Amino acid sequence: MNVLLLEDDVDLGQAVAEHLEAAGHEVYWCKLIAQARAAPESELALLDLNLPDGDALGLLRQWRAAGDRRSVIVLTARDQVSERIRGLQAGADDYLVKPFDLDELLARIVAVQRRVAPPAQVSVQGVALDLAGHRARRGDESIDLTAMEWAVLECLASRTGRICSRDAIVDALVGQGLVGGDSNSLEVIVSRLRKKLGAAAISTHRGLGYRLDA
């Protein structure tokens, strides 16, 4: 999973980054809100609140107002109930008070991601996709898709209208035992999906990944 870590404490930031990377996550570590705004798109953000250039709750509110639905866990020393409520109301999915155990952080990440599921039904360029039933139709015509094609679609559908990184898609394929770690095979799958769903269904964003365009 691609994780954005916003933490200005060097020792804590390094410990969190190393622990997450050891668990297989890809971490982009920022120490300033300005850096987080310019960071590559992520699936999960871990936000300290008190940063040298401001309060990260403002950044979180901006994300939510702009329709950014990435998962967010707040990591902060603010331990009052009122502060936790503010964080959750701003759009955080979870709130972890410092100091915390790194394994507990990993467990909370898993729990948050478990709640994030792709929609059951998606319409793409006139094609109706039933992701739960693995069925695709264009009008009355059924479209046959392979297991690998469905796995890629499920990743893209979980972030419809937003870019899904190549690494995240390949990780999903590997996790389901569908393909090795060679991401070149992903290009082949995407090409086949475009032929079946329409050339405009999936857009490529160089250096970032792919996007399902409904």
Image: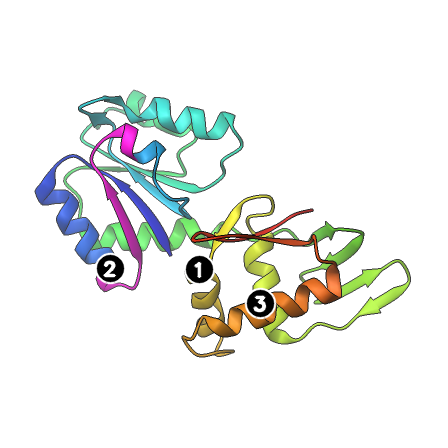
Q: Is residue 15 rendered to the left or right of residue 113?
A: left
Q: Amino acid at mark 2?
A: Glu
Q: Residue at x 31, y 35 (%)?
A: 36
* Cβ atoms under marks 2 and 3 closer than 8 Å: no
Q: Residue at x 17, y 44 (%)?
A: 100
Whole-percent x and y of residue 62?
43, 25
Question: Residue 158 or 30: which is nearer the viewer?
Answer: 30
Residue 42 in view of the camera: yes
Q: Residue at x 39, y 52 (%)?
A: 111
Q: Secondary structure at mark 1?
A: helix
Whole-percent x and y of residue 11?
8, 44
Residue at the disc numbered 2? 21
Q: Which mark sits nearer the N-terminus, 2 or 3?
A: 2
Q: Which mark sits nearer the N-terminus, 2 or 1?
A: 2
Q: CA distance from mark 3 to mark 1?
A: 11 Å
Q: Is residue 29 rendered to the left or right of residue 92?
A: left
Does the stretch in magenta take in 45? no
Q: CA distance from mark 2 to mark 1?
A: 14 Å
Does the stretch in magenta take in 27? yes
Numbered range of the magenta stretch: 22-35
Q: Which mark sits nearer the N-terminus, 3 or 1?
A: 3
Whole-percent x and y of residue 40?
38, 44
Can you tell which quarter of the image residue 198 is in? bottom right
Q: Amino acid at mark 3?
A: Ala
**In the drawing, what numbered circle is on residue 151?**
3
Q: Is residue 148 rendered to the left or right of residue 13?
A: right
**In the drawing, what numbered circle is on residue 168?**
1
